[in-house]
Amino acid sequence: MKKWENNIRRTVPYVPGEQPKEENIIKLNTNENPYPPVRGALSAHLRLEFEKMRLYPDPEARELVEALEKYYGLGGGQVVVGTGSDDILSLCFLTFFNSDRPILFPDVTYSFYPVWAQVYRIPYECPPLDENFCIRPEDYMRENGGIVIANPNAPTSLGMKRSEIEEIVRANPDVVVIVDEAYVDFGGETALPLLEKYDNLLIVRTYSKSRSLAGMRIGFAMGNRELIQFLRDVQASINSYSLTREAIRVGAVVLEDEETFQKNRSAVMDTREWSRGELEKRGFQVMDSQTNFLFAKHGSVPGQKLFEELKRKGIYVRHFDSERIRDYLRITVGTGEQMEQLIRALDELLI
């Protein structure tokens, strides 16, 4: 080993879902929305003045921030935006988890959480989900340096009631509790009403799922003004210009088309329920999803085998090779036609 290697910060990186290079792949492995963004996104994109691209964007992204505050009924200074919710969550870990006490998040959850903890040298512990993959609020009522809850959770697809989230927040007034609501628009119960009651609560959202803008990379956090200002201070110390001019404009404009947003959201949920029923008919155990994906395992065929066989047929789903969920597949809800092709492929494999 070279001497300079002793100073390297090492970690096991997060592994995103595979991005196929081939065409004609049915891509159900990264929880992207199968429907295009609302029409306003395209018009906002086209209206951008190309000449202004030589100028830096607004470091405060005021157009987008104000649009989000209006949309969610928040006061000024209660929103901060960043390059996707991953950027915002990473910023939260760096900003709020700065003690010797371990932060808490479940043993089966978004696999980026332990990566950030390792990168920033934050001690952490992972209370196990119960036998039904549910979070037990009582597991988070002990000494800690902060809490992160994905609600609904990924990859399990299960959501918690707002009252359960409130139990956790109320029991931890001396630390910041982050609720990651990346999938909440697909049937989850948001913690937004709790922001008025608890100054230690922060809610993180993304445009990548229900807003169909994964490629635009827009995420945001909502909380009391003090928490948001702390985030902005750290953000400005790392990257003063976290969003492009295009992302700021498009992110604000798409909030104006509620009709298309609700239509796309409903289409995903309707297709999800149809797909769940079809999978159960074929011997799958499927979690009661409140997300845009299904978490399912077959009664007799291992998850790894199904994952590999589906991939050979040009259908990508997600498989996690970890002990508790090794036999499960995480299946993004695609269009009706895509899900029908998935079911036909499974019929061929399960003969």
Image (cartoon, rainbow, N blue to C red):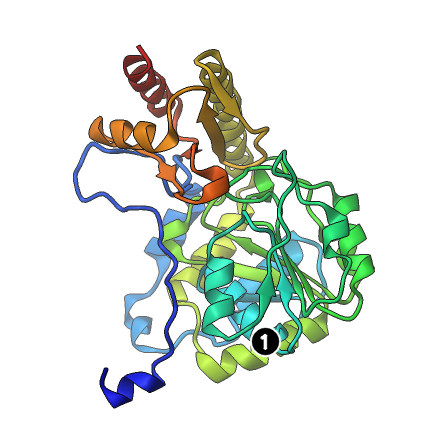
Picture quarter with the C terminus: top left
In this rendered view, identify the residue nearer to me: 60 or 5.
5
Is 10 situated above or below 292?
A: below
* Quadrant of the image occupied by residue 197: bottom right
At x 45%, y 18%, the residue is 279
In this rendered view, identify the residue nearer to me: 241 or 121.
121
At x 64%, y 53%, the residue is 127
Query: Can residue 165 be seen?
Result: no
For residue 16, side relative to residue 157 (left or right)? left
In percent of width and height, residue 232 lies at 57, 76
* Quadrant of the image occupied by residue 342: top left
Query: Can residue 236 be seen?
Result: yes
At x 33%, y 14%, the residue is 350
In percent of width and height, residue 45 lies at 36, 55
In percent of width and height, residue 7 lies at 35, 86
Direction bottom: furthest residue: 3
In percent of width and height, residue 82 lies at 49, 66
* Quadrant of the image occupied by residue 326: top left
In this rendered view, identify the residue nearer to me: 138 or 210.
138
Q: Label 1 amino acid?
A: Thr
Is 115 situated above or below 134?
A: below
Direction left: furthest residue: 22
**Label 1 crowding class (10 Å Cα cut-off): few <14, some 14-19, many 20+?**
some
For residue 292, side relative to residue 171 (left or right)? left
* Number of numbered tags placed on the structure image: 1
Instruction: State the SS at label 1.
Output: helix
At x 73%, y 41%, the residue is 161
Picture quarter with the N terminus: bottom left
- Residue tagged by mark 1? 95
